[in-house]
Image (cartoon, coloured by chain):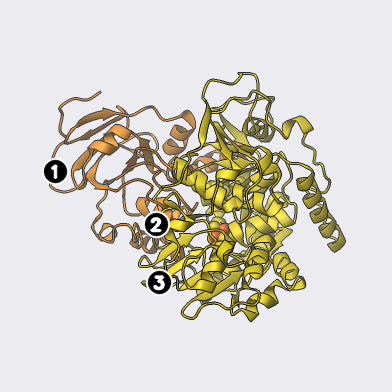
Chain colours: A orange, B yellow
Amino acid sequence: MRTGAVPGGAATAQVVLESLDGGRKAVIRGRAWKYGDNVNTDVLFPGKYTYTAKGRDEIASHALEDLDPAFASNVCDGDVIIGGRNFGCGSSREQAATCMVYNGVGAVIAQSFARIFYRNAINNGLLAIVCPEAAQAIQGQEYVAVDLEQRTIECASGRFVFPPLSATVQEILEAGGLVEQVKRRLASAHTAS
Amino acid sequence: MNQQSPSPVLVGQAGTGSKDAQTFAQKALARAAGCERVEVGEVVDVRPDVVLSHDNTAAIREIWQEFGQARVVIPEKMAITLDHAVPAPTTRHAQNHAEIRRFVQEQGIRHFFEVGRGICHQVLSEEALTLPGQTVLGADSHTPHFGWLGAFGAGIGRSEVAALWATGELWLRVPESIRIVLDGQLPKGVTAKDFALRIIGDWGADGGLYASVEFSGSGVEAMSIDSRMALANMMAEFGAKSSYIPPDVKTRAYLEAALERRAARGTSAGTADDYPPTVAESQLFPDEGAEYIATYRYGAGELEPTVSCPHTVDNIAPLSAVAGTEVQQAFIGTCTNGRLEDIAEAAEIMQGRQVAAGTRLLIVPASSLVLQEAMQRGYIQALVAAGAAIGTPGCGPCMGNHMGVPATGEVTISSANRNFRGRMGTTDAEIYLASPAVVAASAVAGRIADPRDIV
Ligand code: SF4
């Protein structure tokens, strides 16, 4: 499933704004922030802020604080986080995912995800891709392009195809997250009754 | 660090079961989804019996408000506790609690538990708000806790709880199941916590990822209810979606007593008034021959006191390998090990002894009921006499919010469930996890110690 293609080595991160129905970007292009196995939610978003941090900016500012203090101030729109096994394990705190969304992170690619983090990511419209080959091949700070329609990840060492998302996951992502999906459902139930 | 031996036996792998037989997870989710039967891997919309939230309720309310509803649709199924930062350590935390109280009042949420009542998982257990065969979804990662009573409990995110308040239902994937059998009775000084740490150490923090972990065997049958809770609760650290221990006479006795307490208080009307519940007997247990992706068999006699070393739960070592490590703080509490049995063990060890100079011992009972019982039996008196500090029932310093967080450079030995870097507030601190007995013995010695050397 690999070709020799290398993604366009743009000097800065960029997002190609080709919108799908729900406004999702068809191609996500950005730098890779690579981390290891069992990255837990305490280092992604420290517990001491979970009941007090409010608003996008405050939540964004603590992103990955105890994992990579350089992240929050240097991340760009469209950047991609790469994890090893069991990414996002630990607490159910949703800010572990929303702090990435609020920083413009385009996708998280990992060898495997802890289940609550995976749900939180999808439910907040953050594309979470299980692709062990790509997660291993991609190196930190290299440029990565994720094509949602083609289901491909391009990086310096090649091109990887990831498996299709489940219909439920796709529906939520297309709606722009769980809240939007529920709004749609409630609205159609309202019209029906 | 994983030097323990002998290794457990993997006695079964995928594909050995029968297609017709069902796991507990299949049965529970079929019931919650209103289906005759569901298959592993299927995504179904479930209607849980109980929806739990805690100090995060105000944040969930903010999300829920986006739906524009005046009333939540499931007020009777909601259970809300104030437990994570209690009593409020800052004005901001107090503000958060105040918002939650307003919401509870405005929505008429009856199952609301104030500051000081205890940790959500313990309180809901003591109140028998969930019964065997039922499904509980909670905005808390330790919701697999409810496996102790044979219920299906899974942790979910805040948006998902908001969606449940608005619609009463949520998508779940029917998980694969792993079976873990414990043969024989645990030796003296070896606890359910040691068993849980051993499982996580043997198979890794992702060893149970996405799976429902079903326990069985004479070792689990012999366990007290408090021990079963510790075991089921710890499966969150194994990556499990839910856990399950077959309900038996002990489970029934515990829940009946809980329901009687509620009846005596006059708060018994509601969703879970009778025992056994409306769940059919056949839905409470997995079928003979159900399919498991793995079956692990442990002999209780081979287990030993086990410690989880910084900074991951699966980084285990036999107690003997880390004994002698200096500790500045010893903490007994949390939804894993802050129960009566745990405090009793600590009291037995501390009786007539003192906390070592240079070390402090913090005890935070998991609930007000635990605290009351511990006082009646004289445990609290013995612990205070030994120099321990007692905290308000709740999560205490477990997640680094307040009340007993370590200083930089300090080492804590804790009966909690997570030792991640930064978990207790600062990244520059080390956390060892162990059974309450080991924590108490370490407080006496000022270094990690074996309780069997003391008592
Ligand atoms: S005691 Fe700790 S692990 Fe348990 S619910 Fe509270 S913060 Fe979470």
Choose between A17 and B444: the one closer to the eye.
B444
> Mark 1 sits on what residue?
A10
Horizontal and vertical percent for residue B189? 60, 56
> Mark 2 sits on what residue?
B311
Kindly give the residue lying farthest to the front in the view shown: B453
Q: Amino acid at mark 2?
A: His
> Mark 3 sits on what residue?
B410
Give the Cα distance between marks 1 and 3: 45 Å
Residue at left 76%, top 30%? B282
Residue at left 17%, top 33%? A157
Ligand 1 falls in quadrant: bottom right
Please tell me if label 1 and label 2 are on a single chain: no
Numbered-mark total: 3
Give the Cα distance between marks 3 and 2: 14 Å
Question: Is residue B156 in view from this perspective?
Answer: no
Secondary structure, mark 3, is: loop
Whether B342 is drawn above or below B251: the answer is below
Q: Amino acid at mark 1?
A: Ala
Report the disc number at residue B61: none
Horizontal and vertical percent for residue B89? 53, 75
Few, some or many C-alpha atoms within 10 Å of disc 2 (few <14, some 14-19, many ≥20)?
some
Whether A187 is drawn above or below B318: the answer is above
Mark 1 residue CB less than 8 A from any atom of ligand 1: no
Q: Chain of mark 1?
A: A
Few, some or many C-alpha atoms within 10 Å of disc 1 (few <14, some 14-19, many ≥20)?
few
